[in-house]
Image (spheres, rainbow, N blue to C red):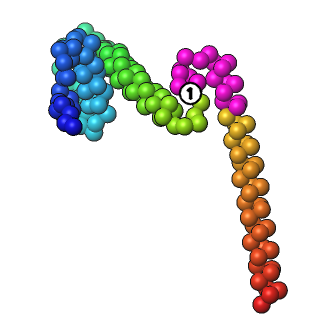
Amino acid sequence: MSFPPTPPVGLPRHRKALHPREVFRHFAASVASASGSPWTFVGACAFLILWMCSYPFFLGFRDPFDAWQLVINTVTTIITFLMVFLIQNAQNRDAKAIHLKLDELIRAHKGARNRLVELEDCTDEELDQLRKEFARIHAESAGRKKAESDHELARVEIEQQNRGILE
């Protein structure tokens, strides 16, 4: 049985890839990825050094220090404002993808509670109840493990004593 060839990763699978939402998604993901790179940090440091050295160009203004500071404040405010939206878009997409992957793992695991698939739709009270239930399960499990390890230690000690008596 042969499968149809899949397009290489990153290439659009169909015409919808040219939709403005997809263009923005690609742009936001690229900017979010680039903003965390070492080169972006180096670029930001270089920009700050250039800004610090640019003070003499502002000496012709009525209040050079205020004008000089206004430039850096305005630029950083605009960049920060835009980056919030771009990074939030990328994080929302990543969170959706992680939820879907976890949902698939829950769904595929025999014995898993499928009601956990849509936890993100639960109220805070429901989430708190579930957290308490998992804390109780963890405590019971830890108690069983402690009891099992105590039994195993006792068994080993008895075996060692029996070998000492038998030898």
- Based on the picture, tell me whether residue 130 belongs to the magenta stretch: yes
Q: Position of residue 51 (x, y in %)?
A: 24, 26
Q: Position of residue 123 (x, y in %)?
A: 62, 16
- Of residues 93 and 17, the one nearer the viewer is 17
Specify the quadrant that holds the C terminus.
Answer: bottom right
Q: Position of residue 108 (x, y in %)?
A: 48, 34
Tell me if residue 99 can be seen: yes
Q: Position of residue 74 (x, y in %)?
A: 30, 14
Q: From the viewer's perspective, is 56 left or right of 86?
A: left
Tag 1 residue: 114
Image quadrant in which you'd find residue 15: top left
Q: From the viewer's perspective, is 163 left or right of 105?
A: right
Where are the magenta residues, as a range? Answer: 115-133
Give the crowd class for mark 1: few <14, some 14-19, many >=20 residues within 10 Å. some
- Based on the picture, tell me whether residue 36 belongs to the magenta stretch: no
Residue at the extreme front: 1
Tell me if residue 33 comes above or below residue 86 in the rendering.
below
Tell me if residue 65 can be seen: no
For badge 1, the amino acid type reads Asn
Specify the quadrant that holds the N terminus.
Answer: top left
**Residue displayed at 27% across by 12% down:** 21
Tell me if residue 151 comes above or below residue 88 in the rendering.
below
Image quadrant in which you'd find residue 32: top left
Q: From the viewer's perspective, is 86 left or right of 162?
A: left
**Residue displayed at 25% across by 9% down:** 62
- Of residues 42 and 161, the one nearer the viewer is 161
Residue at the extreme right: 165
